[in-house]
Image (cartoon, coloured by chain):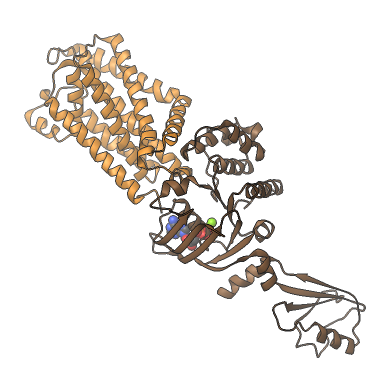
């Protein structure tokens, strides 16, 4: 697949000497939703801001649709929309006016129909003529998204779009993101809500301390790195894990009615057969058993901790 | 060239002025009228003509200059400082625009306001005294060039300032004294010789003198020198703004 963004050996050292990005290589495919995950301070915003032209890189290159983001900044920037992490708004302007402004600023001729469509898709139409200072934080976030979409970008960056927003907006936002993908827009979102990436992303990248430590298709990532858990509902409660089971990573629930067994799907053998055999021999019976797969969250925490 | 961007910035900035029409237009008109009453009528009645022009008429060009200089600086410094302060500047920095579009939008709007204010003051003054303009074209040229270059200067100030103090202290500590000492209310020739020499180091003397020449054909310095000074100031500001955008000074991390 043709990458729409290609980042090569990108580094950033801030004026104070802090290295926020260390030789980042990353390719974003056209039309995908890419989730960039990482803990606070990992360098997500720095990476996005360099691509968008807000922060200057120290070395490396960023190519968008074949154009260099510094040499051909007009070509690259007109293709990009950005919803920043903070919520800076023009206090005395109205949603409609700021959207019209954004569209012009990004070099597009006026198109009231498009602005209307965008404002409606974000449930902002009835607020379009209100002053921004009258709007709630959630509404301001919607306005910022509308602004970013006003010039019909091919690539949309959402920097922590759902940090601190209510459930309703989160759902709306996810719908907007999915609709954008349907229309061919590439979406890159950073988040530390893993659930978001899990729900939306086609591919996931994990960044930590300025280094991209992993890029993988989300489903594959969960398959490969996913830990599984086997839960046994015991017929009789246990006070403690019986001796002789030390070799298994077992966990007994507080009330003694459940035994949890963790295993790795990547492992050669899961050990389930042996465990069940041993339990049988020990006379421990169970009524039911369940398996569940670990979430992206758990994978992520593990990856980041492994790095540390 | 991104014409839509220029239009978007210019339009938004002009709309901002209309929202604050009292602050932007009424205030300078009122303060100038007060200057006029105090300096022109009260004190001026004690002063005879300066170079054949009544004192009231003499101070008109200076008053216009005083207003357009301070208005240009405050309008454009605020226009760029505020987005920087509130964070909305991210959009400008991520937009497909060069410093040319940004300047035409912001500085163009600020200069437009100043020129309008200059025109209003001129009409206000004409109620008090007879004003004849000997060289209207040159007068207009000075008005436009000085509005533009001081708006550029304000833009640089707004980019440089990282706090409200800096934003307000430069106009008060630097521009105000230079303007008042630059011959707004008097002719340099009225000063003792030593102070005349000192005054020639004040660039604003050249601007006010040239502007006044376009009205009454009398000047403290040669008109050519005044014009050269205006163009020099304009060019300097342009180079600084070009450099600011090229390096991202105080704008891009
Ligand atoms: N303007 C700046 N000057 C110096 N350091 C910065 C600047 N912006 C961010 N940093 C530092 O760079 C690191 C990465 O920040 P950021 O990209 O915002 O991370 P994230 O978005 O993943 O939370 C942090 O340690 C942060 O303190
Ligand atoms: Mg961030």
Q: Is B67 located above or below residue B160 in the figure?
A: above
Horizontal relation, residue A227 to residue B152: left or right = right
* Residue in view at x 92 percent, y 79 percent: A236
Indicate the quadrant where residue A201 lies. Answer: bottom right
Tell me what hue chain A is rendered in: brown
Number of numbered discs visible in the structure rendering: 0
- Look at the image and tell me whether residue B191 can be seen: yes
* Residue in view at x 78 percent, y 70 percent: A292
* Residue in view at x 43 percent, y 53 percent: A69
The image shows residue A261 at horizontal and vertical percentages of 78, 78
Identify the image quadrant of the N terminus of chain B: top left
Horizontal relation, residue B222 to residue B184: left or right = left
Indicate the quadrant where residue B224 lies. Answer: top left
Horizontal relation, residue B113 to residue A145: left or right = left
The image shows residue A120 at horizontal and vertical percentages of 65, 36
The image shows residue B211 at horizontal and vertical percentages of 21, 23
Most foreground residue, A61 or B112: A61
Q: Is A99 located above or below residue A13 in the figure?
A: above
Q: Is A65 located above or below residue A216 in the figure?
A: above
Tell me what hue chain B is rendered in: orange
Indicate the quadrant where residue A277 lies. Answer: bottom right
Q: Is A126 located above or below residue A242 in the figure?
A: above
* Residue sticking out furthest to the front: A1
* Residue sticking out furthest to the left: B193
Identify the image quadrant of the C terminus of chain B: bottom left
């Amino acid at each position: 697949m043709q990458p729409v963004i290609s980042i090569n050996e990108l580094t950033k050292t801030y004026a104070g000497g802090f290295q926020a990005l260390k030789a980042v290589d990353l390719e974003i495919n056209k039309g995908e939703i890419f989730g960039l995950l990482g803990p606070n301070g990992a360098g997500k915003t720095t990476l996005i801001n360099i691509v968008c032209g807000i922060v200057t890189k120290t070395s490396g290159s960023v190519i968008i649709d074949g154009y260099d983001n510094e040499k051909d900044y007009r070509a690259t920037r007109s293709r990009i929309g950005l919803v920043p992490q903070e919520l800076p708004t023009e206090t005395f302007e109205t949603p409609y006016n700021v959207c019209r402004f954004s569209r012009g600023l990004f070099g597009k001729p006026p198109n009231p129909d498009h602005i209307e469509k965008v404002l409606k898709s974000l449930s902002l139409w009835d607020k379009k003529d209100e002053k921004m200072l009258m709007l709630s934080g959630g509404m301001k976030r919607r306005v910022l998204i509308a602004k970013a979409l006003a010039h019909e970008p091919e690539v949309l960056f959402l920097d922590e779009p759902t940090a601190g927003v209510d459930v309703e907006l989160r759902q709306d936002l996810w719908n907007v993101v999915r609709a954008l993908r349907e229309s061919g827009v590439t979406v890159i979102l950073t988040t530390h809500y893993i659930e978001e990436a899990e729900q939306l992303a086609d591919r996931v990248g994990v960044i930590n301390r300025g280094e991209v430590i992993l890029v993988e298709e989300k489903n594959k990532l969960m398959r490969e790195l996913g830990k599984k858990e086997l839960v046994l509902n015991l017929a009789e409660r246990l006070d403690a894990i019986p001796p002789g089971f030390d070799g298994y990573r077992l966990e007994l629930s507080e009330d003694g009615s459940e035994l949890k067994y963790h295993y790795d799907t990547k492992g050669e053998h899961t050990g389930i057969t042996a465990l069940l055999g041993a339990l049988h021999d020990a006379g421990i019976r169970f009524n039911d058993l369940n398996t569940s797969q670990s979430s992206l969250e758990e994978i992520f925490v593990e990856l980041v901790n492994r790095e540390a | 060239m991104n014409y839509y961007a220029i239009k978007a910035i210019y339009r938004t900035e002009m709309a901002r002025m209309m929202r604050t029409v009292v602050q932007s237009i009424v205030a300078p008109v009122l303060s100038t009228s007060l200057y006029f009453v105090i300096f022109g009528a009260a004190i001026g009645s004690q002063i005879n003509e300066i170079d054949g022009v009544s004192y009231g008429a003499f101070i008109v060009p200076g008053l216009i200059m005083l207003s357009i200089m301070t208005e240009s600086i405050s309008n454009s410094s605020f226009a760029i400082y505020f987005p920087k302060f509130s964070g909305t500047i991210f959009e400008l920095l991520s937009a497909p625009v060069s410093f040319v579009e940004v300047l035409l939008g912001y500085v163009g709007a600020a200069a437009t306001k100043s020129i309008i204010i200059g025109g209003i003051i001129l009409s206000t003054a004409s109620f008090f005294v007879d004003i004849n303009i000997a060289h209207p074209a040159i007068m207009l040229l000075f008005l436009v060039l000085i509005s533009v270059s001081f708006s550029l200067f304000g833009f640089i100030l707004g980019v440089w300032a990282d706090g409200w103090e800096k934003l307000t202290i430069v106009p008060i500590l630097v521009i105000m004294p230079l303007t008042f000492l630059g011959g707004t209310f008097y002719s340099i020739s009225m000063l003792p010789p030593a102070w005349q020499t000192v005054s020639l180091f004040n660039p604003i003397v050249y601007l006010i003198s040239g502007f006044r020449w376009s009205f009454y054909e009398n000047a403290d310095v040669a008109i050519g020198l005044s014009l050269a000074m205006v163009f020099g100031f304009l060019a300097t500001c342009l180079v600084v703004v070009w450099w600011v955008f090229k390096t991202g000074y105080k704008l891009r991390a």
